[in-house]
Amino acid sequence: MFGATAVATLALCSSAMAVAITGEVSFLGRGTLDNSLLGSATKVTGWAGPGAVANPVAFGPTLALDAFINPGDEATFAAPWSFNSGPVAGLWSVGGFTFDLTSSTIQLQNSQFLNVTGTGILRGNGYDPTPGKWVFTIADADGSPNTDLKFGFVANTNAVPDGGTSFALLGVSLLGLHGIRRRLKA
């Protein structure tokens, strides 16, 4: 079982659609994996929020999303969710938006790091369905499965590679989580 504070970020950019969803939203919460060894885990079996909160919570929504999602709004996540998966309707939902996963694949997995990429569609609140790419990452720097676990979502609707912006956003999210964790320990 993996229980740790985590951050997830979803960033969307405009596309060729008339009323595409734009913006970013992050989530803070915990995930439980099906194996205590990160290198052998195959799925998330459950999600929880920070502290006594039941579900992961949203923070930092921007652009179109901030009109509907408030910091602290609880999100629901599908469980179980396999890292190498096909479609998963309602991977997450918050503020009238739902992210439907199309597919996901493990890119890198070892005892200290897991990186899963995928594609999906964000829908809601009268906007056109907006396609995106996303990344799910858990970093466990010291190899101990019950500490310092982090995950992140980053989606970008651009059909062309973004030159690393998605990974930069993920890195900033993970650094922010590390700072929050250090303040909570103090």
Image: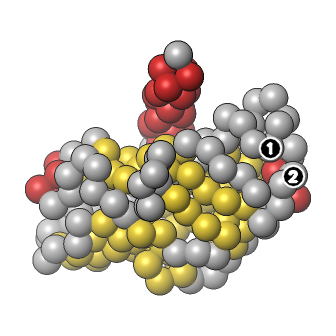
Disc 2 packing (10 Å; few <14; some 14–19; many ≥20): some
Of the numbered discs 2 and 1, the one sitting upstream in the chain is 2
Of 129 and 4, which appears nearest the observer? 4
The numbered mark at residue 37 is 2
Of 48 and 61, which appears nearest the observer? 48
Q: Residue at x 51, y 39 (%)?
A: 170
> Where is residue 26 shown, x and y percent of the image?
38, 47
Q: Residue furthest top?
A: 186
Q: Is 69 rendered above or below residue 19?
A: above
Q: Quadrant of the N terminus?
A: bottom right
Instruction: Please indicate whether residue 163 sits to the left or right of residue 36 in the image.
Output: left
Instruction: Please indicate whether residue 175 sits to the left or right of residue 109 in the image.
Output: left
Q: How many marks?
A: 2
* Amino acid type, callout 2: Leu
Instruction: Please indicate whether residue 20 sits to the left or right of residue 99 in the image.
Output: left
> Where is residue 24 shown, x and y percent of the image?
31, 49
Q: Is 164 rendered above or below residue 41?
A: above
Of 35 and 66, which appears nearest the observer? 35
Using the numbered discs, state the Cα–Cα distance from disc 2 to disc 1 in whole angstroms: 6 Å
| Dots 2, 1 in contact, CB < 8 A | yes
Disc 1 packing (10 Å; few <14; some 14–19; many ≥20): many
The numbered mark at residue 145 is 1
Q: Residue furthest front?
A: 52
* Amino acid type, callout 1: Pro
Of 78 and 98, which appears nearest the observer? 78
Is residue 44 in sight in this rendering? yes
> The residue tagged with tag 2: helix, strand or loop?
loop
> Where is residue 101 shown, x and y percent of the image?
50, 74
Q: Residue at x 72, y 52 (%)?
A: 2
> The residue tagged with tag 1: helix, strand or loop?
loop
